[in-house]
Image (spheres, grey):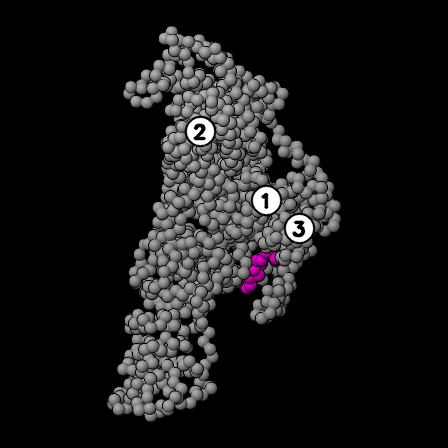
Amino acid sequence: MDEQRPPSIVSEDMFYSDDGSVMEDPSVSVFTEENKIDFRAESALVAVQPGLAAALNEESSSKRPSQEQHPAVEKNAPMAPVAVEVAIEMDAPDSMKRLVGVTSDYQPLSEPPPEEPAIPESPYSPSPHNRLIFINKTESQKFCSNEISTAKYNLFTFLPKFLFEQFRKYANIFFLFIALMQQIPNVSPTGRYTTAVPLMLILSVSAIKEIIEDIKRHRADGNVNNRLVAVHRNGKWMDVRWKDVLVGDIVKVDDGAYFPADLILLSSSEPQAMCYIETSNLDGETNLKLRQGSPATSSIVTGEKLTELRGMVECEPPNRFLYEFVGNIRIGSNISAKRDAFESKFMKKISLSLAWQHLDAVPLGPDQILLRGACLKNTSWIYGLVIYTGHQSKLMLNSTTTPLKRSNVEKMTNKQILLLFLLLVLLSLVCAVANHIWVLSNEDAHWYLFFHVKWEYGDLVRTNFGYNLLTFIILYNNLIPISLQVTLEMVKFVQAIFINWDQDMYYERTKTHANARTSNLNEELGQIKFLFSDKTGTLTQNIMRFSKCSIAGIIYGNNEESKEKFNDDRVLKNLQSEHETAPIISDFLMLLAVCHTVVPQIDENTGEIHYLASSPDEAALVKAAKEMKHVFTTRTPDYVVVDMLGQPAKYLILNVLEFTSKRKRMSVIVRTPDNRILLLCKGADNVIYERLGSDKTYTEETLSHLEQFASVGLRTLCLAKTEISEEFYKEWSNTFYKASTAIQDREQKLEEVAELIEKDLQLLGATAIEDRLQDGVPETIDILSKADIKIWVLTGDKQETAINIGYSCKLLNHSMDLVIINENSLDTTRDALVRHKAQFGEMLGKENYVGLIIDGQSLKYALTCDCKQDFLDIALSCRAVICCRVSPLQKAELVELVKVSQNAITLAIGDGANDVGMIQAAHVGVGISGEEGLQAACASDYSIAQFRFLQKLLLVHGAWSYSRVCKLILYCFYKNICLYVIQFWFQLSNGYSGQILFERWTLGLYNVIFTAAPPIAMGLFDRFCSAETMMKNPILYKDSQTGNLFNVVTFWVWITNAIFHAIVLFWMTVATLRYDVAFPDGKVGDYLFLGNFVYTYVVITVSFKAGLEIVAWTWLTHLAIWGSIVCWFMFLVVYSHVYELIGFSAEMTGMDRYVLSCSLFWFGLLLIPFTALLRDIVWKVIRREFFKTHRQSVQELEKAHKEIKIESTLRKKLRPISERARLLSRNLMNLGDRIVGGRRTQTSAYGFAFSQEEHGAVNQAEYIRAYDTRQAKPQGF
């Protein structure tokens, strides 16, 4: 047998027949470098990779046959390395079973292969950038973890990121410099650690605050990462945390659950692997979307089949495009265990991906992908293959890293600190130069000061100008208050606690408090000028309720007692009586129950019928029919069954004419139980009215009702029907078939065919559906608008829906003109923007009573460089802006555009993952929490449970925090300038020697004890008006919104006032003691005696200055102010008698006796602080009497307990502008421009809105014919 084997041509693993000869296996595929020949048998699965020789060259080169070994091999004959992998189905007949072998050797090519057996180039050519995922196979490649984080820090990044954030503050950099300089011997007049210790304290407090706040973020992330999902691994199902889900895992997701990662839909409980998903968390759209798994995997509905499943997915690398996906899947579900063993051995030679070349690739697209953040709806379960995880999921790629935000007040403070630093350097230079001049002038006269003596470090006074300069920089360093940062951190932290504890922002239903996830931006809440809001889930509840209807010219549904269900007994009463409209009512209710794509589902436990619908509008209509005893019970591929007043009726579904945004209608052609053919149609009123027949009954009444419905923001549809003859239907049906099977322009032809039959309609009535708003939304928007906050609604929903919500939430009203931009190219968008900009004329840049509506397609072009400024000019000239069909990235771009171009503070609020980008882009991000989707809340700066809580968050907490923080910052600078400028005046009396006027530790405790309480009390408890007054008078918000409380002018007014106080306090005290003081023991006052006089007057003055600035006095305020003064006197008494205990400050011994026993001290105590503050008192009185502001007027009324009514100046301002806008818009409408006012135009519709996915994975006709509700659904594992 061995002699018959060609040596070195085949390996020991080749196939032999029973007689020992080499078999010619017809299933073997041979690919060479130059030629490819493939012969396949049905029983074998063969995979060979062209170019594989290169992978085997090293091993097989030594096995090249010689002429001696093989006579057929000629010298230098062309040889080709061959690699063959064969896997045989184990369920094949015994005669076909073979071993699995690999040949890795050279084979002579005596002649080129024939042309005909050659097959085309394999279509499979994996890109090195594509992702390869093997099903039910341990992945050798490491992919991104599924754990997500929205926190700022982790264990390793905390220290560098925290220090970077802290030393972005110029004050901290400055104090670090001072602390280092103080370590130089004989330079610091204030000691070596008087700056280092407070700086370490500041950083420690800040670090503790950041850690506490970031722990909250980590906990919120943990709530998401630790959710459980069922994962199929090693043939078993197990519950796995989201963070442990891996690429290649097969997961099961149940109805109502969120997808833990980006998945490929394999199969589901629904026919043909269909499923519904809700993507409002991603794109803001309210309608459910249909997804369908690949036919190659749709039958895998049991655990056994999942275990047997083998295959490979090749897909594009992770990207952020939500609506795009390209991939292929190759399935070989019945490969045996021997194949697996072979694969693990073969992996040592080549990539496993080559083993799947022989399998046909089934394409995958957006219809097969389920994105993280979306939710499974109306589907019992799905099986999905994980393809993208964690921060590589499309959801996370559309979000940005958590930014390190700083408030506008903090940025301005940094700039002023720079200017103060320049002032400090200037004073130091002046003193250093003056000292040099003084020494040169007085060297001989003051010989006892030893100017000529050389010290260890040189002549410090005379020759070391640099040392002198450093001395003065250290002396004056507290012109920039080191206590400011730690005081601010503490106050803001407590302010955040006040927000968290506010019971007015507690949502009882979900047990959710407001949550300040950061305290750095409290004051920003008081300066908001632009508010960007998501619609779905933020303004609305995602609940559609059938509110009212008009049937045969009669309105039903005026009864407001039932908020959950349609409740008007007159409908059934008129139907069951001999009322003249009874036939119309019957047809109306029948249309609601039949004309839709809803699927009924009966709860096995309760027997109740639930409706599965991709359109929330259709679900509301069918439920309303059910309430009126027209119950849709059964759907099959051919007919539906409706229980009408207890009697079942079968309607054959002949055709479905789908809804599209272009058609604005949907029709169903049915055969009734009495064998009539009816076309049932629902759609926009303008579309239906154009197709009405000669019977115009009820049209005027219905039109009036539609206007009434639209005026309150209800979503309207018109219902109509027509009867079709058999002959016409047969003819039309043939035409419809041809159009539906056309290769080219199919959609256009179907629309043309639909026009042939959707005519001569009879109007039945109209429906009005309420898109339920969150509680208090209209009132909140109205209040915020009065506070001069511009509100932009950014939604992924349709234009009609967005406009309706704009009306219902009072953002728009029917006296407001609308500018609608809805273009589909860059050129048309540019032209529209230029035209509208010109139409505004002199009103451009002013606030007009106009609303701007723009869709996502137009916005894409409007945000390009060419159009950006024109778009911004128009948007800023409008009172309200609604952007619809926008992507998450566009939301963030809009916020960034306004944020960069306008000197105004922005706030973004949303509840979904699609809102994370704009939340992080805005100055302040607010997330809606309390529901299942917490992505927005985790990424936000503040989270609240309801939109209405934004009113108190901004108007009360924001305004209070801004006022408090501004006063605190100004006061901290004031009190330090007041004390440390006195050191400069003292240099005039001591030859600019750098000597300090005050005892060292007395000076060090100035900010820590004696003046620490007033700014804290001011920052925590001061308020210019009560919360109730602030909520009722939003115009008060304007004072903080404009930033007048803290700007460059205000800052330097305070600094100038502090310098004035320092002049009065020092020089008046010097004047008081100009004749010196002699004590009974013969001693006279020294520089510390003067210093303690001045220090006492400074403490009293700055404490009373705080009292002048505080508006709301409480017992804590009194304690802070009077307690500071008492603390100083107690300290003076104690510190004057502890030298023997502490061993330093001997010069202070007995100082209390000298100071407190001096009559001049008490005289100065009454006169000097009062003189310093006299200017402040007079100016305060003048302002109150002659320059009274709204805020001061309200304060006086509030103290007098009188009713407060202040008309918004904003509304006065808008009235004349809106009148000019209406006059202008009338002229423009005559020119055909797309500006419409409150009146109806020919092409507009009264409140029409209908949510339905268009061009979905399965068209509506195929979808409803796929269901048979009489059959049980697969249960999965």
For label 1, the residue is 901
The quadrant where residue 1 appears: bottom left
Mark 3 or mark 1, whichever is nearer to me: 1
Secondary structure type for disc 2: loop
Q: Which residue does the image show at 43% across and 39% down from the upper left? A: 166
Mark 3 or mark 1: name the one nearer the start of the chain: 3
Q: Please tell me the numbered disc located at residue 833.
A: 3
* Residue density around tag 1, few if under 14, some if 14–19, many if 20 or more, within 10 Å: few
Stretch of the chain drawn in magenta: 654-667
Q: Which residue does the image show at 43% across and 10% down from the upper left? A: 1077
* Residue density around tag 3, few if under 14, some if 14–19, many if 20 or more, within 10 Å: many
Amino acid under disc 3: Leu
Amino acid under disc 2: Val
Height in image: 670 above or below 101?
A: above
For label 2, the residue is 461
Q: Nearer the viewer, residue 649 or 1126?
A: 1126
Disc 3, disc 2: CB below 8 Å? no
Indicate the position of residue 811 as horizontal and vertical percent values. Answer: 59, 41
